[in-house]
Amino acid sequence: MAFKLPDHLDRAKAAAEARKAKLDKFRSAPPPNEDALAARARAAEKRAEREEQRKVERAEAAVRAEEARLAKEAEALVKAEQARLEAIAREAAQKAARDARYAARKKGR
């Protein structure tokens, strides 16, 4: 006796029986309990409130992070400007010293 693969009709019949069994199981289930539905609705409401709270907290954290980034950027700009002014002052002092040396050399002649 050889192994026989199920043909299309056998597969269709098995699928129809499975669908019928699933439908019978669904139909035989008891109706939902009002208390359970109310509890599920309350849980969904609480979950929505927690999600909204998390959304607000994430937005506040993003604002704080942006403020910190802007403060750091402003501090970097202030430091850069201060370094530029110090460089200008240093160059002016070097030029004044160089001019003083040049004037002393001219005076010595």
Image (tube, rainbow, N blue to C red):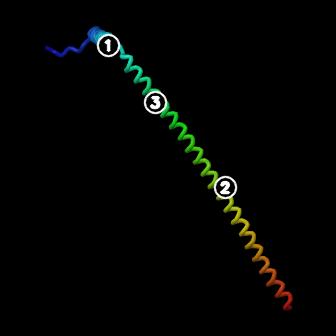
> Dot 3, how many residues are within 10 Å of its Cα: few (below 14), some (14-19), or many (20+)?
few
Disc 2 vs disc 3: which is toward the camera?
3
Residue 59: image location, x then y, percent: 56, 40
Q: Is residue 37 left or right of residue 73?
A: left
Structural distance between the alpha carbons of marks 1 and 3: 27 Å
Query: What mark, if any, has residue 75 been given in the picture?
Result: none
Residue 46: image location, x then y, percent: 46, 30
Query: What mark, if any, has residue 46 been given in the picture?
Result: 3
> Dot 1, how many residues are within 10 Å of its Cα: few (below 14), some (14-19), or many (20+)?
few
> Dot 2, how many residues are within 10 Å of its Cα: few (below 14), some (14-19), or many (20+)?
few
For residue 11, say whether it is visible. no
User: Mark 2 = which residue?
Assistant: 74
Residue 48: image location, x then y, percent: 48, 30
Q: How many labels does the image show?
A: 3
Q: Which of marks 1 and 3 is nearer the N terminus?
A: 1
Q: Is mark 3 on a helix, strand or loop?
A: helix
User: Mark 1 = which residue?
Assistant: 30
